[in-house]
Image (cartoon, rainbow, N blue to C red):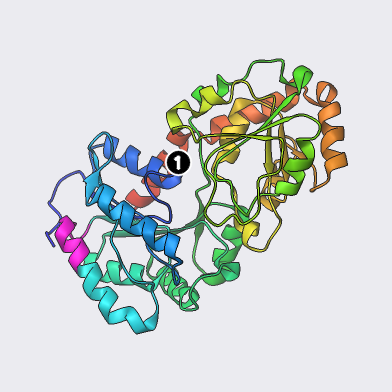
Amino acid sequence: MQNQKASGKQSILILSNVDWEGLWYQKQEIACRFAQEGHSVWYINRTLQRWPRWHHLKSRIRLRRVHDEGRSSNGAIRILSPLWLPPVPAFRLVNRWLIRRSLAKAGIPSGGWLVTYVPTQNTLDVVTLVKPNRLAYVCVHNYDAAPVVRDLLRAERELCHQADLILADSAFNFRRLERLAPGRTVYKLPPGVDALPFSQAYRGDEAIRRQNMVYFGSIGPHLDLLLYGEMARHLKVTFIGTISSDLREPIPDGIELRPAVVHNRLAEALVDADMLALFYRPTAYMDGVLPAKFFECLATQKPILVSGLAEATNFANEIYDVGGSAPRTLEAIRNLPQYETSERLQFRRRVAEEADWAVRFAAFRDLLNSEFRS
């Protein structure tokens, strides 16, 4: 691997838990903004964290063929899809060899900044090889309840010890990191939004019309499909997204399926929505989840119906928590003309503006530029 050149720009390596070509998350946004500032950015798609099913393995092989150390659409970000083995002790020596080979082949220099969303032994081996000047770990899941390899929690504690910055994307994960890394300062890095384009999805008559309920994003076992299906008996329900290969139950009758929309066209696709619905199944794994789409929903200013999302209770003034109940959902919808006050709309606008990606990114970049270890 090359040495970091002495210049005002950094080499930035991002170890992501999501693929570049999938739904748009904090990881891709941060990568793009670093690249726009002239930094050299490498983005590593998610690697195996547990024993794969066949469709997981096929997706890794397909991405390897698609990207093959290619670049993002604007050519500024190098995207890698390395085939590393799951981070279990039996594969450690082989994985170290595979990791070393991947980094060297991609020309990733030593030093620079390393931002990881993946707390595994494979990540620790990347850190050892790259020797970053700044190491940041962003916790985006409640791994205590995740179906991952047993070795992960040990690796996560070690990563928290080594990292210059530890950050969490939700209040639950913030408290979790405080327990994992006692005495360390934990910072918050929630999802964000391009507030202006999403604000243009607001028409003004949503609370009066209240006919079209929309969900956008991954369609999988994390959704409360029963509640969506019940709503489809009373009004139009539309899903915009792709069906996860992990989904084992059918989509309820009456729900209209539309294909996923590229991120820069998503706001346009939401103009016709009267309500946005985030109905999740409450599980321990979901405790730490604040969906990336949450602030996008707020920015539209449209009514937001939420269920099974503990993190959303911190936004009681902006949303309607229906608690998994079809009668409560229907009651909230009936009363939208009274509930959707100018004050509630102002709450949503303010939160969305504070969550704008320009604000989120600047805060994160400034933390990485800090000369002290938290």
* Label 1 crowd (10 A; few <14 / some 14-19 / many >=20): some
What residue sits 84% from the left and 34% below the top?
330
| Along the line of sight, the residue nearer the viewer: 330 or 42 | 330
Q: How many marks?
A: 1
Q: Is residue 75 left or right of residue 246?
A: left
| Along the line of sight, the residue nearer the viewer: 230 or 16 | 230
Q: Position of residue 203 (x, y in %)?
A: 64, 16
* Quarter assignment of residue 319: top right
Q: Is residue 117 above or below residue 307?
A: below
- Residue range (magenta): 101-111
What residue sits 37% from the left and 62% below the top?
47
- Describe the element under mark 1 as helix, strand or loop: loop
Give the amino acid type for the residue marked by disc 1 in the picture: Trp
Q: Position of residue 240 (x, y in %)?
A: 57, 35
Q: Is residue 37 above or below residue 147?
A: above
Residue 277 among those drawn in magenta: no
What residue sits 40% from the left and 40% below the top?
29
Q: Position of residue 241 (x, y in %)?
A: 54, 39
* Quarter assignment of residue 372: bottom left
Q: Name the outermost residue toward the bottom.
A: 90
Task: Return the residue at label 1.
Answer: 24
Q: Is residue 239 left or right of residue 192?
A: right
Q: Quadrant of the C terminus?
A: bottom left
Residue 102 among those drawn in magenta: yes
